Image: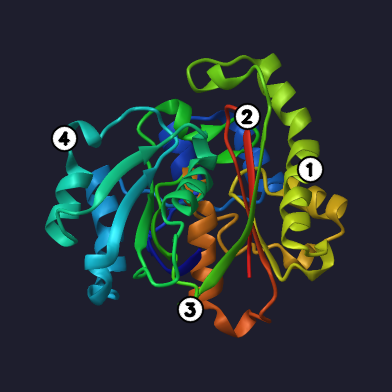
């Protein structure tokens, strides 16, 4: 399966760290850690827009460049971190599919992996778009990401980072001849006994997650690289997710990937956009900064607060 395009919706007017502190009142300690240690600058928020408005904007932006493919788009998946089913209670995604694509499209929600649910969505699409015959016509699917920072539990994480409201829409296909990035491997790991953290957590559980993060994520990435038959030093770019930036220096050090391969453009300025970080970064690195590419493998990763870890290799 291939990724053939990505569209994003990022507010060009980012909300600065001082304004966020005034809004969230996270205290002097967090302010010093965010600014001096994590080097965070701002976050992408849309205070005057609803979640359906943000998602539809990203979807329409993607579809505008692929009008000829609409009849072959079979699935639209919304990957989100928060377990609420909104906007599906109003069947908005289904309505958008009928309005902009066609009544044949099946829409569904993926949320079981928290912020790693987008890569879970890709694994699902790999299975349902598996072509039985080379003579079958190619099919397409769209993966949507984006959430709102509507509650204090999804606005910032003490001593770790900020959340953001950036959205993405990604077009995938089972057409082996299409131009794009091939999904070469996808690996998963799960940290047990903490799945309830999406409802309630404690300092002990948070510490356990933090201690386990580097070893489990390292193992997950190694599995993905081994499945793709790629050595760590061959990775052209590592696309991080936007929480606790120094963690990724430690991670690539363990993997023997040079630190300069970490793609840092959005790491300090747009916040952790839930399920969307990998695809927002992929859009900017692959689509906007083509001159940086050497043609090597791209490594994406995601981790969910409930203990889901995933790594994706694109070639």
Q: Can you tell which of label 3 and label 4 is closer to the viewer?
A: 3
Q: Position of residue 54 (x, y in %)?
A: 28, 52
Query: Residues under labels 4 and 1: Cα distance?
Result: 40 Å
Describe the element under mark 3 as helix, strand or loop: loop
Which residue does the image show at 48% across and 17% down from the upper left? Answer: 199
Q: Is residue 63 left or right of residue 172?
A: left
Q: Can you tell which of label 3 and label 1 is closer to the viewer?
A: 3
Q: Position of residue 49 (x, y in %)?
A: 24, 47
Q: Position of residue 292 (x, y in %)?
A: 63, 80
Residue 263 versus residue 223 in the image, above or below: below
Compare marks 2 and 1 and give the one earlier in the sequence.
Answer: 1
Describe the element under mark 4 as helix, strand or loop: helix
Which residue is situated farthest in the bottom direction here? 291
Q: Nearer the viewer, residue 11 or 65?
A: 65
Q: Is residue 141 visible?
A: yes
Q: Which residue is mark 1?
A: 219
Query: Residues under labels 3 and 1: Cα distance?
Result: 32 Å
Q: Position of residue 129 (x, y in %)?
A: 42, 56
Q: Which mark is residue 203?
A: none
Q: Which residue is mark 3?
A: 177
Q: Which residue is mark 4?
A: 90
Q: Which residue is mark 2?
A: 307
Q: Are marks 3 and 4 in contact (CB under 8 Å)?
A: no
Q: Can you tell which of label 3 and label 2 is closer to the viewer?
A: 3
Q: Are marks 4 and 2 in contact (CB under 8 Å)?
A: no
Query: Residues under labels 3 and 4: Cα distance?
Result: 38 Å
């Amino acid at each position: 399966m291939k990724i053939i395009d990505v569209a994003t919706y990022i507010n060009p007017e980012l909300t600065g760290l001082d304004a966020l502190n005034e809004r969230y009142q996270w205290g002097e300690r967090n302010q010093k850690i965010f600014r001096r240690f994590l080097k965070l600058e701002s976050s992408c928020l849309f205070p005057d827009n609803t979640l359906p408005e943000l998602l539809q904007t990203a979807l329409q932006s993607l579809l505008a460049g692929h009008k000829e493919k609409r009849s072959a788009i079979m699935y639209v998946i919304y990957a989100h971190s928060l377990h609420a089913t909104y906007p599906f209670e109003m069947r908005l995604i289904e309505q958008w599919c009928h309005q902009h694509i066609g009544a044949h499209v099946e829409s569904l929600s993926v949320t079981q992996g928290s912020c790693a649910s987008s890569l879970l969505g890709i694994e699902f699409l790999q299975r349902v778009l598996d072509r039985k015959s080379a003579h079958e016509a190619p099919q397409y699917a769209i993966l949507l990401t984006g959430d709102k920072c509507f509650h204090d539990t999804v606005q910032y994480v003490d001593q770790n980072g900020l959340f953001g409201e950036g959205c993405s829409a990604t077009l995938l296909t089972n057409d082996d001849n299409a131009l794009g990035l091939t999904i070469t491997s996808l690996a998963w790991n799960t940290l047990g006994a903490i799945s309830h953290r999406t409802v309630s957590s404690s300092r002990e559980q948070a510490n356990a997650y933090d201690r386990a993060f580097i070893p489990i994520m390292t193992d997950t990435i190694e599995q993905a690289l081994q499945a793709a038959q790629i050595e760590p030093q061959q990775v052209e770019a590592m696309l991080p997710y936007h929480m606790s930036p120094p963690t990724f220096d430690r991670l690539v050090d363990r993997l023997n990937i040079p630190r300069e391969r970490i793609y840092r453009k959005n790491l300090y300025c747009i916040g952790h956009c839930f399920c969307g970080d990998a695809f927002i970064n992929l859009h900017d690195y692959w689509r906007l900064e083509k001159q940086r590419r050497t043609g090597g493998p791209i490594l994406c990763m995601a981790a969910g607060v409930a203990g889901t870890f995933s790594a994706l290799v694109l070639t």
